[in-house]
Amino acid sequence: MATLLEKVRILISANVHALIDQALKSNSLAVVDQYIRQVEDQLANLEDAAATVGGELKSLQRKLEEHRRRATELDQAVDGFLLEGNETAAAAAQSRLNGAQQLVENYQEQLSRQDGEYQKLLDAKVRLDARHANMQQQRAELQSLLELAKSKEIVVKTMKGLDALMGSGDSDVNRIAQSIYARLDKATAAVEVRGVSLDEQIDQVLGRNALNAQLEARKQRLALNPPPDVKELPSPDNK
């Protein structure tokens, strides 16, 4: 499980800015898609691991309750034998009670350790789910940016072709070219407006992520998020 949590930690700490820059430079979403697939694979692994550990927790909880009941019965039996004056039976029952109490302590320790591992898995899944949602959103925005870039390339190529027509000396061709130029100017302006909007959206998302990271670090420093004392078995269904 330690290896799984380390892989998740690496994915969560990945430099999102670098991924976005690489995608924009290569004019391709391949690097972002690969990262999202890795996140999805580890999410599936986390769910499987959490289900396994959660099942083991339930088994430990059940065994612990059984030994607690047995210890209670033996404790009552010791008192009963003593009241009857049967010290031999009382001593035997006391010996069995000591063994049952030791088992209870052992299961309590195992349950505490196992629950700690379970909580780590649930926490990792929550954080990786958040990163997955964030990257899905940024992928959509990047796709729009790349499509805008392609549109602008087409506009540039078309305008170069029109420049060649304008220099041909034919008045009809010049008039048609001027009309097309007007439409292209309008389309180019629309592309630029959309591009600015998307750039701002990405900056807002990335800026918000940085703020969240700073707040989380401050909470840890101020000890505002101490690990809860686990008394009852959490259900894997509520992960």
Image: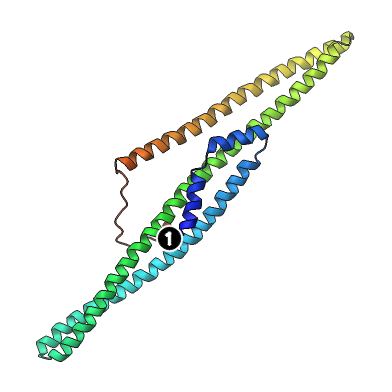
- Measured as percent of width and height from the top left, residue 188 is found at 69, 20
State the image quarter where residue 23 is shown: top right
- Measured as percent of width and height from the top left, residue 26 is found at 67, 35
- Measured as percent of width and height from the top left, residue 45 is found at 52, 58
Is 7 positioned to the left or the right of 178 in the image? left
Question: Looking at the rendering, in which quadrant would you find the C terminus?
Answer: bottom left
State the image quarter where residue 54 is shown: bottom left
Nearer to us in this view, 27 or 197? 27
Residue at horizontal 63%, vertical 22%? 192
Nearer to us in this view, 173 or 132? 132
Residue at mark 1? 236
In the image, is residue 148 above or below residue 172? below
In the image, is residue 20 above or below residue 2? above
Do we see residue 233 in this rendering?
no
Nearer to us in this view, 105 or 167? 105
Residue at horizontal 45%, vertical 57%? 2
Residue at horizontal 27%, vertical 70%? 105
Is 48 positioned to the left or the right of 31 in the image? left
In the image, is residue 167 above or below residue 7? above
- Measured as percent of width and height from the top left, residue 38 is found at 58, 50
Q: Amino acid at mark 1?
A: Pro
